[in-house]
Amino acid sequence: MSQARQQLAVQLAEAVAEALRSDLDAQQRVLLVVSGGSTPVPFFHALAAYDLPWSRVDVTLADERWVADDSPDSNARLVREHLLQGPAAAANFVALTSAAGTPEQGVADVSERVESLAWPASVVVLGMGGDGHTASLFPDSRELDLALSSDEPLVAVRTPSQPQPRITFSAGRLHQARRHMLHINGDDKRSVLAAALGGDDVRALPIRAFLACPLAIYWAP
Ligand SMILES: O=C1O[C@H](COP(=O)(O)O)[C@@H](O)[C@H](O)[C@H]1O
C-alpha cells in the first residue's frame, strides 16, 4: 500500500467520521452506506478506530454479490472483517443477501429490511470500476435502466461481464443521501473519471449518475 493511498484513506475516514458525528448530534440513528471491492480496506481500518457512538450507527452496502456470507467475493465479509472491528464493532450491519437462491427471489425481503434504516443516509461512499461502474450499476447490466430509474430501494441485476448475480441500491435511493464521496486509486481510474466528467451518456459510464450529487472525489495515484 503506497503512502499516498494510505493517507487518502485516512482523509476519507476523517471526513466520514465528521459527517457521522455531525448527524449523530442531531438524530438518534444514522446510516452509512459503503462500497465493496478492494479499494476500501485501508479506509475501513482508519474509520473503525474512530471514537463514535457506533451503537447508533447502521452500516450497509451500496451493492452485493449474491454469494454466501463467508465467500471471498462477499462484500459483507469484507465489511465484517475490516470495518466492524474495534470501536466500530458496535455498529449495526445490515447485509443485502438472504437465504433465497437468487437476488430476484430475495430482493423483496432485503428491501423490507433496508427500509427500516434511518434514510436518508448520512454518507454514501462509492467506489468505481475500470468500466465506470459504481455500486452494481454496470454498463452491461441488463437491468441498468431499471436501476437508474427505479423508485424501489434495491434492484436485482444480471451482468454478463460478472460471474455472480448481484443486488444493488438504485441510483435514486443512493442519490437521497446527504453526502456522496467517491474513493478511487490509480491512473487508470483517474482516466475513467476524466472521461466521465467529459461526457453525459450515463449508460456508457454509470458513475456519471452521481457526478452532480455533488460528489467529493478522493483519489490517490
Ligand atoms: O464490484 C465492485 O467493484 C467496485 C470497485 O471495486 P474495486 O475492487 O475496484 O475497488 C465497488 O465499488 C463495488 O462495491 C463492488 O461490488
Image (tube, helix red, strand yellow):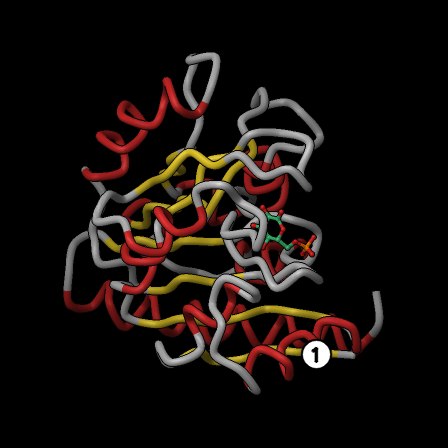
Q: Look at the image and tell me in which quarter the N terminus lies.
A: bottom right
Q: Residue at x 39, y 74 (%)?
A: 18
Q: Position of residue 115 (x, y in %)?
A: 20, 39
**Element type at mark 1:** helix
The image quarter containing residue 109 is top left
- Examine the rendered structure and indicate whether residue 128 appears above or below residue 193: above
- Examine the rendered structure and indicate whether residue 160 appears above or below residue 25: above
The image quarter containing residue 143 is top left
Q: Position of residue 65 (x, y in %)?
A: 56, 33
The image quarter containing residue 167 is top left
Q: Position of residue 159 (x, y in %)?
A: 58, 39
Most extreme residue toward the right is 2
Q: Is 88 on the left-hand or right-hand side of 54?
A: right
Residue hosting label 1? 190
Q: Residue at x 36, y 55 (%)?
A: 148
Q: How would you rate the neighbour count of disc 1 (Cα within 10 Å): few for under 14, some for 14-19, many for 20 or more?
A: some
- Examine the rendered structure and indicate whether residue 164 appears above or below residue 29: above
